[in-house]
Image (cartoon, rainbow, N blue to C red):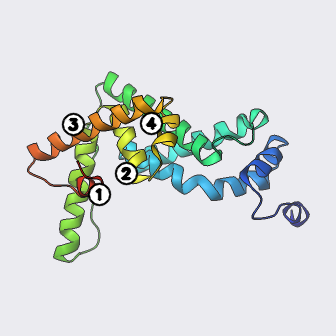
Amino acid sequence: MAEALAQIELDDSDDVLMARVAARDAIAFRLIVERHLTSVHRVAYRMLGDAAGAEDVAQEALLRLWDHAGRWQSGGTGVGAWLRRVATNLCLDRLRRQKFSGGHEIPDLADEAPRADQQMEADQMREATRQCLGQLPDRQRAAIVLTYYEDRPNAEAAAVLDMNIKAFESLLLRARQTLRRIFEEKGLVPEIFGKAGQ
């Protein structure tokens, strides 16, 4: 193992590592996982609102990367963008299945530690925001998550959703308008609208 690790530089690009993954190099794959797992899990959690489901999606996305490594083409948008796209699509599929099967309310997470008043207010706003996001249509939710929570440029977020930039910007505008209406109905003023204007 030490010999295999010696052949891999920790600063090797994802494309270099993917060439090794295509040859079934488990150590190169482990480095890819270490670089991108957190981001993929974060997207899935924000889309689904469920830690276990997010973990399943992240694992499925990484498994697909392993399975498709032989077809990897360097110089594209990169491994991180590819994984976020796969994770987003897996989340959209799960959300569609939940709606088809009747869905269910996602239980609130228990707060195990006592918090100061300010932290409690921040937690309440975060929870209210999560619930409001959950009311958005799936693709609008994906647009908000990728843009505001993952700080992805519009071009990359559009690619993740397999849309052209104009269509994505229109989707994002509709998502913001819908989300604003949901917040106003609840009497809330979320940070998200302060960040990016109207």
Circle 3 — which element?
helix
Query: What's the distance in space between the residues labelled 3 and 1, CA to CA?
Result: 17 Å
Which is nearer the eye, 97 or 126? 126
**Up/down of 74 relative to 26, above or below:** above
Do callouts 1 and 2 mark residues in contact (Cβ within 8 Å)? yes
Query: What's the distance in space between the residues labelled 1 and 2, CA to CA?
Result: 9 Å
Do callouts 4 and 2 mark residues in contact (Cβ within 8 Å)? no
> What type is the residue that disc 3 sits on?
Thr
Count of number-bearing discs: 4
- The residue to which callout 3 is attached is 178
- The residue to which callout 1 is attached is 195
Query: What's the distance in space between the residues labelled 4 and 1, CA to CA?
Result: 26 Å
Do callouts 3 and 4 mark residues in contact (Cβ within 8 Å)? no
Binning the other alpha carbons within 10 Å of mark 4 as few (below 14), some (14 to 19) or many (20 upward) gives many
Which tag is nearer the camera, tag 4 or tag 2? 2
Badge 3 or badge 1: first in the primary sequence: 3
Q: Outermost residue toward the bottom?
A: 116
Badge 4 or badge 1: first in the primary sequence: 4
Which is nearer the eye, 57 or 75? 75
> What type is the residue that disc 2 sits on?
Tyr
- In the figure, residue 59 lies in which quadrant? top right
Query: What's the distance in space between the residues labelled 4 and 2, CA to CA?
Result: 17 Å
**Up/down of 162 relative to 57, above or below:** above
Identity of the residue drawn at 85% across and 42% down: 23
Badge 4 or badge 2: first in the primary sequence: 4
Which tag is nearer the camera, tag 1 or tag 2? 1
Q: Which mark is residue 148?
A: 2
